[in-house]
Image (cartoon, rainbow, N blue to C red):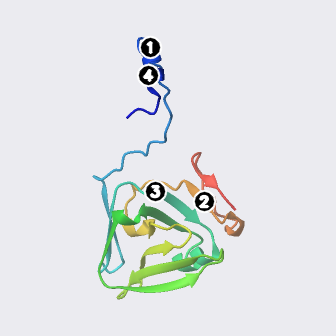
């Protein structure tokens, strides 16, 4: 059934058809071939991540500094359906300095944090980049919480977005 009255259709016959294209965002293709393995220190827990990370970031927040035991943490985020976590884990949740809740999954044997989720980023799982032990891992593109960055730390690169 046509949305135009029959008279309008008859009037259009024989006239060139004009099409208007509407630009719609197209999602990039999902990489389902790249698989990365992250493990805890003792090897009891592993995360298999499929595809490219949705984000690789550095966090200078006090919570990240405490979690990593370093001046900052570097994490890679993946869509939740692209991560398979296997092995005995324990969980701990906390409200972070920005007011969001984060749930950490760590090895029940050695205590290494292997994954975490944050309510502010639903559907995403973050994996500490060091757990991959891969020198070819993509570099960070975001540097968060720079207002609490140690003064001797510099995250460089033209593609890095710096945020306070």
Which of pointers 4 and 1 lies earlier in the amino acid sequence?
4
Looking at the rendered structure, the number of numbered marks drawn on it comes to 4
Q: Determine which quarter of the picture holds residue 53.
A: bottom left
Mark 3 touches mark 2? (CB < 8 Å): no
Q: Secondary structure at mark 4?
A: helix
Task: Determine whether the residue tagged by mark 1 lies in a helix, strand or loop.
Answer: loop
User: Above or below — where is 105 with respect to 142?
Assistant: below
Q: Quadrant of residue 94?
A: bottom right
- Of circles 4 and 3, which is in front? 4
Mark 1 lies on residue: 16
Dot 3: element = loop
Coordinates of residue 90 in the picture (x, y in percent): 40, 87
Residue 42: x and y in percent read 32, 81
Q: Earlier in the sequence, mark 4 or mark 2?
A: 4
**Viewer-closest of 112 and 96:** 96
- Mark nearest the camera among 4 and 1 is 4
Q: Which mark is residue 143?
A: 2
Q: Quadrant of residue 151?
A: bottom right
Q: CA distance from mark 4 to mark 2?
A: 58 Å
- Which of disc 3 and disc 4 is earlier in sequence? 4
Residue identifier under label 4: 9
């Amino acid at each position: 059934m046509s949305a135009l009255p029959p008279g309008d259709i008859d009037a259009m016959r024989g006239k060139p058809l004009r099409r208007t294209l509407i630009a719609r965002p197209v999602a990039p293709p999902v990489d389902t071939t790249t698989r990365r393995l992250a493990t805890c220190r003792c090897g009891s827990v592993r995360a298999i991540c499929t595809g490219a990370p949705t984000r690789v970031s550095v966090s200078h927040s006090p919570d990240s500094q405490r979690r990593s035991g370093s001046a900052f943490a570097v994490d890679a985020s993946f869509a939740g359906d692209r991560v398979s976590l296997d092995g005995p884990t324990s969980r701990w949740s906390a409200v972070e300095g920005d007011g969001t809740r984060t749930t950490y999954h760590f090895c029940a044997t050695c205590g290494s944090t292997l994954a975490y989720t944050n309510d502010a980023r639903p559907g995403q799982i973050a994996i500490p980049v060091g757990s991959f032990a891969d020198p070819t891992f993509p570099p960070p593109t975001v540097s968060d919480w720079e207002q609490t960055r140690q003064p001797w730390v510099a995250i460089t690169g033209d593609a890095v977005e710096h945020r306070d």
